[in-house]
Image (tube, grey):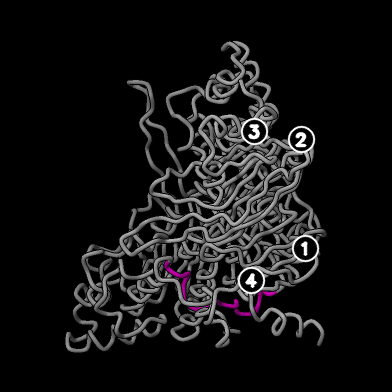
Amino acid sequence: MININDLPGYDDAAPLLEVDNLCVTFESFEGEVAAVDGVSFTVNPGETLCIVGESGSGKSASQMAILGLLSTPPAMISGSVRFCGIELVHAPQSTLFTVRGSGVSMIFQDAITSLNPSLKVGFQIAEVFCARTGSDRANGRKYAIELMERVAIPDASHRVDDYPFQFSGGMCQRIMIAMALALNPKILIADEPTTALDVTVQRQVMELLKSLSKNADLALVLITHDLGVAAEQADKVMVMYAGRTVETGLTDAVFAKPYHPYTQALLSSMPDVTNNFNRLGIINGSPPVLTKLPEGCSFRPRCQFAAPMCRLNRPQLFVSGPSRASACLRVNDIFKKKSSNV
Amino acid sequence: MFEPLLSVKNLTKSYLIPSRGFLSKPLKLKAVDGVSFSVAAGETLGIVGESGCGKSTLAKCLARLVEPTGGQVRFKQRDFLKLGAEDLRQARRDIQFIFQDPYSSLNPHMTVAQIISETWVVFPDLLPKKAWRDRASELVQLVGLDASDLDRYPHQFSGGQRQRIGIARALASEPKLLICDEAVSALDVSVQAQVVNLFQDIQDRTGVALIFIAHDLTIVRHIANRTAVMYLGRVVEEGPSEDIFSNPEHPYSKALISAAPILDPNIRAAREIINISGELPSPLERTAGCKFLSRCWKASDICSSLEPDLERFASQRGVACHHAGIGAYRTDKKGK
């Protein structure tokens, strides 16, 4: 097995994950569609980054592109993704094989369909471990039990021989997490890991992810559309809209005082304990179709602050405060002025 | 005497599941198990609970889309369950359904005008054919679409717009009761709020009563006057939403409400999370006593032998727990 340290470009001092100007485009009948358009972020050890956005905002596509899970063609990927300095975009398959699992691993929304229904869960958990370390089945089984205990599956030594259908949704998600942890990755990308789960089970899985990131120094990239989950889990958030990052920053700061009209509108449209008796704030219209993006800022047609200048060009993400960035041209007019009045 | 629009007593729906053995008796699965509540005209009742707790079966029983196996449903002063086929058909114009999935609940071969007018095809005495088009265009405008959308097909609309079409269709027969089964859960966050507000507008304008079923607690809290919490086919707690959410009595509602993610860091810091172990047990495993027993931290001897009934306490609250209301409510009740 090749170690990550032996891969070309490996650098201990480099950030754990550095994504720079990542673009994912697809060819369609109506021309090229940019699912992800110039996304950049970094993830440090032990940190939880939450990517928030609606369906079609490019949050999943960007993460799939990081691990090279999109087949090219039809996807066209440009930009740079470096894991510990190792370039992953257009990297040879051997590099990706090494990094997947032991460097970066991923869990998906629908755990039950992500598991192979005809194989015992223990075998599925240990499969990648056996393949990579060359250990035998008996060892793999032992290791699978260990991992299942780590993700708090009760009675692991018996359940290791069960099939996925014998587990509930929450338990299947735990099995997926165990599988993803098999090679001790440094980053876990979780794509809507709790969306399909019930509230009480969602809470259990959220607590599990939190304890893993705390105890194992595991960096988490959490993709979600649920702002509540993001608020509770994340150190940093990144809000995406129509393939672009519209705002980034530390979670509490962003949710307390958003610097982008989209984030602000999204927050006011959530019923919360505090605004219970008021009407919900609404965002007019619906998310844009990527083939027919409006000119200028893509949020412009739905934005209550839109001005003629917003039509001219698509705003870039720029620094708008301490570790904050916003892609709104009018950020100073709208948000900063308000705060000085208060 | 004042009678609510809809009153449900002891409603039960059970299914027979063939068991493994050749001669053994089939197992009985009680999807809805003795549920009682009432809805007044213009009121919104929220029903929350996790998947598999019988919310949707209950909703379908109310419209008799599935036939309940027991209990009573009175709707508009009539025994709804005893209506014959033609009477039921007529009665259903007053009970309309809005479904979760806006993509599969509209016929792709019909234009919006046809989808909405279908109601008047079924109930021809409701509206003369000449007026169909005008009324349809009024309805689409009521739900926030344009009259020019009438000749378009469902695939030309986004999810939120389709849900609006579904609402317009439901309103075509001027119902007294709308049953919304997870009507907003398939929508994007920014669109969800539009539809929730739309429901409130429509209710203000037409005085329709809503039964709002959802697993998203914050939305139910926002929209519903009263809330019922279901667990394994039973209503474990019922009462005014504000009471239920700010001061839940049943251990399950406590756990459920505390598990919901909270945005505001200050409120989040004050909250105490109650983690309940395990997941929903199989509804087939028949145990005497309380259904929440296996996950409850308050369980005692009585809970394993006697299933608690929904007992009414002060302020129209009902709780089905032997340990609920140890404070004021309980002494109150004993005193009576």
Which amino acid is tagged 3? Pro
Of A140 and A168, the residue lying toward us: A140
* Nearer the observer, B45 or A44: A44
Residues at marks 1 and 4 on the same chain? yes
Dot 1 corresponds to which residue?
A: A323
- Residue at the spot x=35%, y=81% of the render? B140
Estimate the spatial distance between the alpha carbons at disc 1 and disc 3, rounded to whole Å. Answer: 31 Å
Say which residue appears at 69% left-offset and 69% top-offset.
A318
Q: Position of residue B282 (x, y in %)?
A: 52, 36
Q: Amino acid at mark 4?
A: Ala
Pointer 3 residue: A8
Quadrant of residue B87 within the rendered picture = bottom left
Relative image position of residue A272 (x, y in whole percent)? 67, 68
The chain carrying label 2 is A
Looking at the rendering, which quadrant does residue A67 occupy?
top right
Disc 4 to disc 2, how far (Cα)? 34 Å
Q: Is residue B2 visible?
A: no
Q: Earlier in the sequence, mark 4 or mark 2?
A: 2
Residue A30 falls left or right of residue B284: left
Say which element carries label 3: loop
Residue A216 - label: 2
The magenta span reads: A275-289
Q: Is residue B182 left or right of residue A183?
A: left
Mark pair 2, 1: CA separation = 25 Å
Q: What's under tag 1, amino acid-wise? A: Ser
Q: CA distance from mark 1 to mark 4?
A: 14 Å
Q: Which residue is mark 4?
A: A327
Q: Alpha carbon of mark 3 to alpha carbon of mark 2: how far?
A: 26 Å
